Image (tube, rainbow, N blue to C red):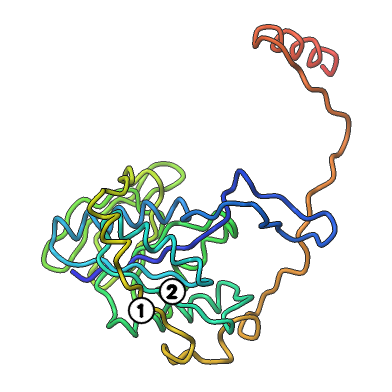
Amino acid sequence: MKIVVCVKQVPDAKDVRLDPVTNTLSRDGVQSIMNPYDRHALEEGVRLAGEEGGSVTVISMGPPQAAEVLREAVACGADEAVLVSDRAFAGADTWATTHTLAQAIKKVGGADLVLCGKQAIDGDTAQVGPGLAERLNMPYVTCVRKVLASDNGVIRLERLMDDGYDTLEVKLPTLFTVVKEINEPRLPSLKGKMKAKKLQITTFSAADIDADPDQIGLKGSPTQVVRVFSPQPRGERTIFSGPVEEQVEKLAVELAKIV
């Protein structure tokens, strides 16, 4: 089974802050990490490849420093890594991103299974997975919480729903987006770290993947972020301190005043 896992380098959510002057995300001094949902997609890809036989290729679209998360992915069991990097990709929304990733996947020879995290913690749109499947003309299942079995090109799985889960069967090739409940990501092994350190990461430009100039980057993005801002506090706020028991008593008193 040939598996492709799409990963994204994102700013660590606990360190994210806004520049009060430019109203944009301030990345100075903010650590970049692999998108947490993508970690689960990677783990599932490595697990399936080990059980079913096959290979795992990780692909990331981003600046040169995104190679860091690709090496981390290889240290965790991926076989190959591809960085899709070009200034022409700057400013891409999800529409342009899916075109770029689809072209990259075609460049590496396609895949039997494409795995993505449910969403990225910096954008939270959950659009790239389904959009990529459409670009690749693949059936897809979102919010996969468990892969039950794979037999003769058919995968049986559970999809997380608001009120439980669905059990589905889907034929390969296909694309899944996964949720955190699907597994517990492994830590990089010493052997994996040594492999990642020596690995020559394949890098593709827009020309290398035959990307359509009208469908990439800012030019190919129908949506654009005009402004990012922190909402202003509204109304009065009361902060309780002290032991939990005291805080609960104070809260009860304040709620009684409202009632």
SS for dot 2: helix
* Residue 105 occupies quadrant: bottom left
Residue 132's disc is 2
Residue 16 percent coordinates (x, y) = 65, 49
Q: Between disc 2 and disc 1, whose residue precedes?
A: 1
- The residue lying at 39 percent from left, 42 percent from top is 164
The residue lying toward the viewer, choosing from 62 and 42, is 62
Q: Residue at x 29, y 66 (%)?
A: 198
Residue 27, compared with residue 63, is above or below; it is above
Which residue does the image show at 65% across and 7% down from the upper left? 245
Q: Give the vertical position of 243 relative to 49 (above or below).
A: above
| Residue 38 % position (x, y) | 41, 56
- The label on residue 224 is none
- Who is closer to the viewer here, 45 or 167? 45
Is residue 235 rendered to the left or right of residue 4? right
Image quarter (top left, top right, bottom left or bottom right) of the N terminus: bottom left
Task: Determine whether 224 is above or below 248 in the image.
Answer: below
Q: Mark 2–mark 1 contact, CB under 8 Å?
A: yes
Q: 122 above or below 108?
A: above
Circle 1: is it few (<14), some (14-19), or many (20+) Cα within 10 Å? many
The spot of residue 115 in percent (x, y) is 34, 63
Quadrant of the image for the C terminus?
Answer: top right
Residue where numbered disc 1 is placed? 105
Farthest residue in the right direction? 235
Image quadrant of residue 173?
Answer: bottom left
